[in-house]
Image: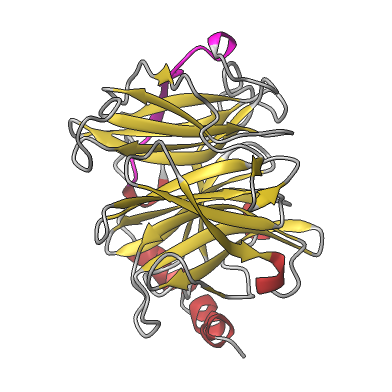
Amino acid sequence: MNRRQLLKGAALSTGAAAIGALQLPAPASAAPAGFPNYQYLGVPFTKSALRYNPTNELIFPCVRGVYDKITGGLGRYYLYYAPHEKPGGICLAYGNSLSGPFTEYPANPIVSNTWSPYYSVSHVSSPHVLWSASNKKFYLYFHGENNTTRMAWSTDGVHYTYFGVVLSTSMVPGTTETSYARVFEHTVTGLGNKYVMLFMGVTGGTRKIFWGWSSDAKAWQFDPTPLVTPGPDGQVDISGAHLLKRNGTAYVVYHGNGGDQFLTEVGNAFDREVHLGVFHPALSGAPDNGRAAAPSFGTDGGVEYMFYEAGARLSATIAVARAV
């Protein structure tokens, strides 16, 4: 029996008390647990004007401030994103404000679906970048194929060196897909870790959120039991998870197949699953058209922003919302 299974019963038995203990949002906020409400602001760039756009579908934004990490950067903020279908490709845009505009890096993709001699796959996608302050490097996580998550590193956030596979279905028993990974600094007492990974795993034909832990963000251990399941949200599939911290505890925000984003408290020990409902509803009109997915968060001048994947699969773009 793994650690997650041992604690699951206790988490379920205390769920009602935990919800009551949370700080309730102010009347002006629509998000649970006191999180701000995010309002659509615009798009960081014009998709139709991009030089590299092989599928007309852009997904999985990851925004990072680099102004305090490197000198001579392209801009204060780097925005990573990718096409979804073949051939994919990890792309970069840069800007000096999270409210935009962002400029496409002229040599996109910075990582392609072929990287000799390491791999040649149908596509690569879902970029997530972690800054490792201890060795002053950017770690880029991306999938390709859908059962394999890879990592590369960089000192400037633009030019990357391949590291290797960090996650695959062979490492998580019972899964047929392991992708859309994001990595965060977060210590779980007793595990000797500094980092956690959230990712989408497919078991029994449905998509759930799984997690793993690492001391160096390179070598990982994974819990075979899902961290968050879709049923309590009235969903069949969930994906695009992001870790948020507030109220002295940890939450996971993610999107469901219905199009909205949801919030679940997992606790600092990742031993809970308290579903709190809709975190951010998708706009019925453009650009969401009923789907707001894969959020990534940043702060600029004390203002909180959320970059997300807007629109139906096969035609999605990157959008920006601002806390109100």
| Coloring applied to the structure | secondary structure
Nearest the eye: 36 or 49: 49
Q: Position of residue 89 (x, y in %)?
A: 61, 34
Q: Residue furthest bottom?
A: 1
**Which corner quadrant of the image does residue 294 belong to?**
top right
Residue 30 visible? The answer is no
Check residue 255 for magenta coloring: no
Nearest the eye: 251 or 46: 46
- Residue at 45% across, 44% down: 160
Q: Is residue 36 above or below residue 23?
A: above
Check residue 41 for magenta coloring: yes
Q: Is residue 239 above or below residue 270?
A: above
- Residue at 81% across, 58% down: 205
**Which corner quadrant of the image does residue 111 belong to?**
top right
Relative horizontal placement of residue 172, taking residue 265 as reference (left or right): right
Q: Residue furthest top?
A: 49
**Quarter in which the C terminus is drawn:** top left
**Quarter in which the N terminus is drawn:** bottom right
Q: Position of residue 314 (x, y in %)?
A: 72, 27
Residue 301 visible? The answer is yes
Q: Is residue 287 above or below residue 278?
A: above
Q: Count the marks: how many?
A: 0
Q: Position of residue 20 (x, y in %)?
A: 38, 64
Nearest the eye: 294 or 87: 87
Q: Position of residue 243 (x, y in %)?
A: 42, 55
- Residue at 37% across, 85% down: 190
- Range shown magenta: 35-49
Q: Is residue 108 above or below residue 14?
A: above
Relative horizontal placement of residue 303, taking residue 149 as reference (left or right): left
Q: Residue furthest right?
A: 205
